[in-house]
Image (cartoon, rainbow, N blue to C red):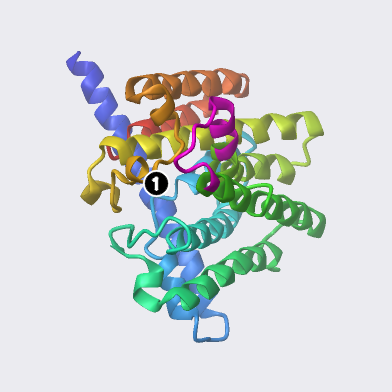
Amino acid sequence: MKKQIIKSWKLLKKMKNEINKIIKDTNYFLKKFIDNQNSSHLINAMKYGLFPGGKKIRSKILIDIGSLFSINYKTLIQIGAAVECIHAYSLIHDDLPCMDNDKIRRGKASTHIKYGESTAVLAGNSLLTMAFEILSNKNLDLSEKTKVNLIKKLSECSGHQGIAGGQYLDLNYEKKKVSRNKIIEMEKKKTGMLFSFCCIAPAIIKNKKNLELKFFENIGSDIGLLFQISDDLIDYRGNSKIAGKKTGKDQKKGKATLISLLGYNNAVKYCNNLVINITGKLKKYGSNSKKIKQTLEYILNRDR
Protein backbone atom coordinates (compact mmCIF):
# COMPACT_ATOMS: atom_id res chain seq x y z
CA MET A 1 0.00 0.00 0.00
CA LYS A 2 2.81 2.39 0.98
CA LYS A 3 4.68 1.61 -2.26
CA GLN A 4 1.52 2.33 -4.26
CA ILE A 5 1.06 5.71 -2.54
CA ILE A 6 4.71 6.63 -3.24
CA LYS A 7 4.33 5.57 -6.88
CA SER A 8 1.13 7.62 -7.25
CA TRP A 9 2.82 10.64 -5.66
CA LYS A 10 5.80 10.37 -8.04
CA LEU A 11 3.49 10.10 -11.06
CA LEU A 12 1.50 13.13 -9.89
CA LYS A 13 4.71 15.13 -9.39
CA LYS A 14 5.93 14.12 -12.87
CA MET A 15 2.56 15.07 -14.38
CA LYS A 16 2.63 18.49 -12.71
CA ASN A 17 6.18 19.09 -13.97
CA GLU A 18 5.13 18.20 -17.52
CA ILE A 19 2.08 20.46 -17.35
CA ASN A 20 4.12 23.32 -15.87
CA LYS A 21 6.57 23.07 -18.77
CA ILE A 22 3.71 23.17 -21.28
CA ILE A 23 2.21 26.20 -19.49
CA LYS A 24 5.57 28.00 -19.53
CA ASP A 25 6.34 27.20 -23.18
CA THR A 26 2.82 28.02 -24.41
CA ASN A 27 2.64 31.33 -22.55
CA TYR A 28 6.12 32.26 -23.79
CA PHE A 29 5.07 31.62 -27.39
CA LEU A 30 1.80 33.55 -27.00
CA LYS A 31 3.44 36.56 -25.33
CA LYS A 32 6.06 36.70 -28.07
CA PHE A 33 3.40 36.32 -30.78
CA ILE A 34 1.29 39.16 -29.34
CA ASP A 35 4.33 41.40 -28.78
CA ASN A 36 5.22 41.05 -32.48
CA GLN A 37 1.80 42.40 -33.50
CA ASN A 38 0.81 46.03 -33.85
CA SER A 39 -0.65 47.35 -30.62
CA SER A 40 -4.38 48.01 -30.28
CA HIS A 41 -6.90 49.14 -27.65
CA LEU A 42 -7.96 45.50 -27.16
CA ILE A 43 -4.53 44.01 -26.42
CA ASN A 44 -4.71 44.46 -22.64
CA ALA A 45 -8.15 42.84 -22.40
CA MET A 46 -6.95 39.99 -24.66
CA LYS A 47 -3.91 39.40 -22.46
CA TYR A 48 -6.07 39.56 -19.33
CA GLY A 49 -8.35 36.81 -20.63
CA LEU A 50 -5.47 34.73 -21.94
CA PHE A 51 -2.85 34.91 -19.16
CA PRO A 52 -1.75 33.30 -16.99
CA GLY A 53 -4.27 30.80 -18.32
CA GLY A 54 -5.41 27.50 -16.88
CA LYS A 55 -3.66 24.16 -16.66
CA LYS A 56 -3.33 23.78 -20.46
CA ILE A 57 -4.96 20.32 -20.33
CA ARG A 58 -5.98 20.61 -23.99
CA SER A 59 -2.39 21.30 -24.98
CA LYS A 60 -1.25 18.39 -22.80
CA ILE A 61 -3.61 16.03 -24.63
CA LEU A 62 -2.40 17.42 -27.98
CA ILE A 63 1.22 16.73 -26.99
CA ASP A 64 0.36 13.27 -25.63
CA ILE A 65 -1.32 12.28 -28.91
CA GLY A 66 1.46 13.99 -30.88
CA SER A 67 4.01 11.77 -29.11
CA LEU A 68 2.30 8.71 -30.63
CA PHE A 69 3.36 10.07 -34.03
CA SER A 70 6.74 11.54 -32.96
CA ILE A 71 5.69 15.08 -33.92
CA ASN A 72 8.05 17.95 -33.08
CA TYR A 73 7.32 19.42 -29.62
CA LYS A 74 7.72 23.03 -30.80
CA THR A 75 5.15 22.46 -33.56
CA LEU A 76 2.69 21.03 -31.03
CA ILE A 77 3.23 24.00 -28.69
CA GLN A 78 2.35 26.41 -31.51
CA ILE A 79 -0.81 24.49 -32.39
CA GLY A 80 -1.64 24.25 -28.69
CA ALA A 81 -1.28 28.03 -28.42
CA ALA A 82 -3.98 28.41 -31.08
CA VAL A 83 -6.19 26.02 -29.08
CA GLU A 84 -5.64 28.06 -25.91
CA CYS A 85 -6.73 31.21 -27.76
CA ILE A 86 -9.97 29.50 -28.77
CA HIS A 87 -10.47 28.25 -25.21
CA ALA A 88 -9.85 31.71 -23.72
CA TYR A 89 -12.29 33.29 -26.20
CA SER A 90 -14.97 30.76 -25.23
CA LEU A 91 -14.48 31.44 -21.50
CA ILE A 92 -14.64 35.23 -21.93
CA HIS A 93 -17.94 34.89 -23.80
CA ASP A 94 -19.21 32.14 -21.47
CA ASP A 95 -18.82 34.47 -18.46
CA LEU A 96 -20.90 37.30 -19.99
CA PRO A 97 -24.18 38.32 -18.28
CA CYS A 98 -26.17 37.12 -21.32
CA MET A 99 -24.54 33.68 -20.98
CA ASP A 100 -23.58 32.18 -17.59
CA ASN A 101 -23.01 35.53 -15.87
CA ASP A 102 -19.90 34.47 -13.94
CA LYS A 103 -17.96 37.21 -12.18
CA ILE A 104 -14.88 35.13 -11.28
CA ARG A 105 -12.64 33.21 -13.67
CA ARG A 106 -9.31 31.56 -12.87
CA GLY A 107 -9.16 33.23 -9.46
CA LYS A 108 -9.70 36.80 -10.67
CA ALA A 109 -12.49 39.04 -11.95
CA SER A 110 -13.92 37.91 -15.29
CA THR A 111 -12.86 39.94 -18.33
CA HIS A 112 -16.22 41.73 -18.66
CA ILE A 113 -16.05 42.76 -14.98
CA LYS A 114 -12.55 44.17 -15.47
CA TYR A 115 -13.01 45.83 -18.88
CA GLY A 116 -16.74 46.02 -19.55
CA GLU A 117 -19.02 43.83 -21.64
CA SER A 118 -18.40 45.34 -25.08
CA THR A 119 -14.62 45.20 -24.68
CA ALA A 120 -14.85 41.60 -23.43
CA VAL A 121 -16.87 40.56 -26.50
CA LEU A 122 -14.37 42.20 -28.86
CA ALA A 123 -11.36 40.80 -26.97
CA GLY A 124 -12.89 37.32 -27.19
CA ASN A 125 -13.53 37.74 -30.91
CA SER A 126 -9.93 38.89 -31.38
CA LEU A 127 -8.56 35.82 -29.58
CA LEU A 128 -10.72 33.62 -31.79
CA THR A 129 -9.25 35.11 -34.96
CA MET A 130 -5.72 35.16 -33.51
CA ALA A 131 -5.88 31.36 -33.28
CA PHE A 132 -6.11 31.21 -37.07
CA GLU A 133 -3.31 33.75 -37.42
CA ILE A 134 -1.11 31.36 -35.42
CA LEU A 135 -2.02 28.34 -37.56
CA SER A 136 -1.45 30.23 -40.82
CA ASN A 137 1.83 31.83 -39.68
CA LYS A 138 4.91 31.20 -41.81
CA ASN A 139 6.87 30.15 -38.70
CA LEU A 140 4.67 27.08 -38.22
CA ASP A 141 6.78 24.43 -39.93
CA LEU A 142 4.03 22.61 -41.83
CA SER A 143 2.90 22.46 -45.45
CA GLU A 144 0.30 24.97 -46.61
CA LYS A 145 -2.14 22.12 -47.26
CA THR A 146 -1.75 20.85 -43.69
CA LYS A 147 -2.26 24.36 -42.30
CA VAL A 148 -5.48 24.73 -44.30
CA ASN A 149 -6.74 21.35 -43.03
CA LEU A 150 -5.95 22.32 -39.42
CA ILE A 151 -7.69 25.69 -39.80
CA LYS A 152 -10.74 24.02 -41.37
CA LYS A 153 -11.03 21.52 -38.53
CA LEU A 154 -10.50 24.11 -35.80
CA SER A 155 -13.13 26.36 -37.43
CA GLU A 156 -15.65 23.49 -37.36
CA CYS A 157 -14.87 22.78 -33.71
CA SER A 158 -15.29 26.42 -32.68
CA GLY A 159 -18.53 27.39 -34.43
CA HIS A 160 -22.15 26.26 -34.54
CA GLN A 161 -21.13 22.61 -34.97
CA GLY A 162 -18.95 22.78 -31.88
CA ILE A 163 -18.36 25.18 -28.98
CA ALA A 164 -20.94 27.81 -29.98
CA GLY A 165 -23.59 25.19 -30.76
CA GLY A 166 -22.90 23.41 -27.47
CA GLN A 167 -23.16 26.66 -25.52
CA TYR A 168 -26.54 27.32 -27.16
CA LEU A 169 -27.81 23.91 -26.04
CA ASP A 170 -26.38 24.42 -22.54
CA LEU A 171 -28.36 27.64 -22.14
CA ASN A 172 -31.47 26.23 -23.80
CA TYR A 173 -31.55 23.15 -21.53
CA GLU A 174 -31.53 25.12 -18.25
CA LYS A 175 -34.35 24.14 -15.88
CA LYS A 176 -35.63 21.52 -18.31
CA LYS A 177 -35.84 17.75 -18.13
CA VAL A 178 -33.23 16.54 -20.62
CA SER A 179 -32.33 12.98 -21.63
CA ARG A 180 -28.88 11.47 -21.11
CA ASN A 181 -28.22 11.33 -24.85
CA LYS A 182 -29.04 15.02 -25.27
CA ILE A 183 -26.81 15.99 -22.33
CA ILE A 184 -23.94 13.97 -23.80
CA GLU A 185 -24.48 15.54 -27.23
CA MET A 186 -24.42 19.02 -25.67
CA GLU A 187 -21.27 18.36 -23.63
CA LYS A 188 -19.46 16.76 -26.56
CA LYS A 189 -20.16 19.89 -28.61
CA LYS A 190 -19.45 22.44 -25.90
CA THR A 191 -16.27 20.82 -24.58
CA GLY A 192 -15.55 17.69 -26.60
CA MET A 193 -15.04 19.32 -29.99
CA LEU A 194 -11.94 21.27 -28.95
CA PHE A 195 -10.47 18.11 -27.43
CA SER A 196 -11.37 16.35 -30.69
CA PHE A 197 -9.23 18.88 -32.53
CA CYS A 198 -6.34 18.26 -30.13
CA CYS A 199 -6.52 14.54 -30.87
CA ILE A 200 -7.10 14.71 -34.61
CA ALA A 201 -4.50 17.46 -35.31
CA PRO A 202 -1.46 15.12 -35.03
CA ALA A 203 -3.20 12.63 -37.36
CA ILE A 204 -3.89 15.46 -39.83
CA ILE A 205 -0.22 16.47 -39.70
CA LYS A 206 0.80 12.88 -40.48
CA ASN A 207 -1.73 12.74 -43.33
CA LYS A 208 -3.54 9.72 -41.90
CA LYS A 209 -6.49 8.13 -43.69
CA ASN A 210 -10.12 8.94 -42.85
CA LEU A 211 -10.63 5.87 -40.67
CA GLU A 212 -7.77 6.84 -38.34
CA LEU A 213 -8.80 10.50 -38.39
CA LYS A 214 -12.29 9.50 -37.25
CA PHE A 215 -10.80 7.25 -34.57
CA PHE A 216 -8.87 10.13 -32.99
CA GLU A 217 -11.77 12.54 -33.42
CA ASN A 218 -13.95 10.16 -31.38
CA ILE A 219 -11.21 9.67 -28.79
CA GLY A 220 -11.03 13.45 -28.35
CA SER A 221 -14.79 13.70 -28.05
CA ASP A 222 -14.77 11.15 -25.22
CA ILE A 223 -11.88 12.93 -23.49
CA GLY A 224 -13.82 16.19 -23.72
CA LEU A 225 -16.86 14.51 -22.20
CA LEU A 226 -14.67 13.19 -19.37
CA PHE A 227 -13.28 16.70 -18.81
CA GLN A 228 -16.74 18.29 -18.74
CA ILE A 229 -18.19 15.77 -16.29
CA SER A 230 -15.09 16.18 -14.13
CA ASP A 231 -15.62 19.94 -14.26
CA ASP A 232 -19.25 19.45 -13.22
CA LEU A 233 -18.08 17.27 -10.32
CA ILE A 234 -15.84 20.12 -9.19
CA ASP A 235 -18.77 22.51 -9.38
CA TYR A 236 -20.91 20.08 -7.36
CA ARG A 237 -18.48 19.44 -4.49
CA GLY A 238 -15.27 21.34 -5.22
CA ASN A 239 -13.59 24.19 -3.38
CA SER A 240 -14.00 27.61 -5.03
CA LYS A 241 -10.50 28.75 -4.05
CA ILE A 242 -8.86 25.63 -5.52
CA ALA A 243 -11.06 25.67 -8.63
CA GLY A 244 -10.42 29.38 -9.24
CA LYS A 245 -14.13 30.03 -9.84
CA LYS A 246 -17.38 29.99 -7.92
CA THR A 247 -18.73 26.47 -7.37
CA GLY A 248 -22.29 25.26 -6.84
CA LYS A 249 -23.57 27.26 -9.82
CA ASP A 250 -24.97 24.39 -11.89
CA GLN A 251 -27.59 23.37 -9.33
CA LYS A 252 -28.72 26.97 -8.74
CA LYS A 253 -29.15 27.60 -12.47
CA GLY A 254 -30.77 24.24 -13.14
CA LYS A 255 -28.07 23.17 -15.58
CA ALA A 256 -28.56 19.90 -17.43
CA THR A 257 -25.61 17.71 -16.35
CA LEU A 258 -25.04 14.00 -15.95
CA ILE A 259 -24.69 14.62 -12.21
CA SER A 260 -28.19 16.09 -12.01
CA LEU A 261 -29.49 13.12 -14.01
CA LEU A 262 -27.46 10.19 -12.62
CA GLY A 263 -26.30 11.46 -9.22
CA TYR A 264 -22.75 12.20 -8.04
CA ASN A 265 -21.53 8.63 -7.46
CA ASN A 266 -22.92 7.31 -10.75
CA ALA A 267 -21.34 10.24 -12.60
CA VAL A 268 -17.96 9.30 -11.07
CA LYS A 269 -18.48 5.69 -12.21
CA TYR A 270 -19.34 6.94 -15.69
CA CYS A 271 -16.05 8.88 -15.76
CA ASN A 272 -14.05 5.86 -14.61
CA ASN A 273 -15.60 3.78 -17.39
CA LEU A 274 -14.72 6.49 -19.92
CA VAL A 275 -11.06 6.34 -18.83
CA ILE A 276 -11.06 2.53 -19.17
CA ASN A 277 -12.66 2.68 -22.64
CA ILE A 278 -10.37 5.43 -23.95
CA THR A 279 -7.15 3.82 -22.70
CA GLY A 280 -8.30 0.43 -24.00
CA LYS A 281 -8.74 1.82 -27.51
CA LEU A 282 -5.30 3.49 -27.42
CA LYS A 283 -3.36 0.40 -26.26
CA LYS A 284 -2.60 -0.53 -29.88
CA TYR A 285 -0.30 2.53 -30.03
CA GLY A 286 2.09 1.01 -27.51
CA SER A 287 3.82 2.32 -24.41
CA ASN A 288 3.45 6.00 -25.35
CA SER A 289 -0.29 5.70 -24.76
CA LYS A 290 0.45 5.36 -21.03
CA LYS A 291 1.04 9.11 -20.91
CA ILE A 292 -2.51 9.69 -22.05
CA LYS A 293 -3.87 7.40 -19.33
CA GLN A 294 -1.97 9.38 -16.70
CA THR A 295 -3.36 12.65 -18.10
CA LEU A 296 -6.91 11.24 -18.05
CA GLU A 297 -6.53 10.20 -14.42
CA TYR A 298 -5.22 13.67 -13.63
CA ILE A 299 -8.29 15.21 -15.31
CA LEU A 300 -10.62 12.98 -13.31
CA ASN A 301 -9.03 13.70 -9.93
CA ARG A 302 -8.11 17.40 -10.30
CA ASP A 303 -9.31 20.03 -7.80
CA ARG A 304 -11.64 17.69 -5.90
Residue 67 in view here: no
Q: Nearer the viewer, residue 97 or 222?
A: 97
Residue 93 location (% of width, % of height) = 49, 62
Q: Is residue 181 magenta?
A: yes
Q: Nearer the viewer, residue 290 or 219?
A: 219
Q: Nearer the viewer, residue 226 or 97?
A: 97
Q: Quadrant of the C terminus?
A: top left
Residue 81 in view here: yes
Which span of residues is magenta-colored? 172-186
Seen in the picture, residue 219 relative to 31 is either above or below; the reply is above
Q: Is residue 165 magenta?
A: no
SS type, badge 1: helix
Rendered image quadrant of residue 214: top right
Q: Residue lying farthest left?
A: 2
Instruction: Give amino acid for label 1.
Output: Ile
Residue 58 location (% of width, % of height) = 50, 46
Rendered image quadrant of residue 254: top left
Residue at 52% from the left image edge and 62% from the top image edge:
89
Seen in the picture, residue 179 relative to 111 is either above or below; the reply is above
Question: How many numbered markers are drawn?
Answer: 1
Residue at 28% from the left image edge and 51% from the top image edge:
246
Residue at 73% from the left image edge and 35% from the top image edge:
213
Residue 256 location (% of width, % of height) = 46, 37
Q: Quadrant of the N terminus?
A: top left
* 259 lies left or right of 210: left
Decide: few, some or many residues near mark 1? Use Cα within 10 Å; few <14, some 14-19, many ≥20. some
Q: Residue lying farthest top?
A: 1
Which residue is tagged 1? 19
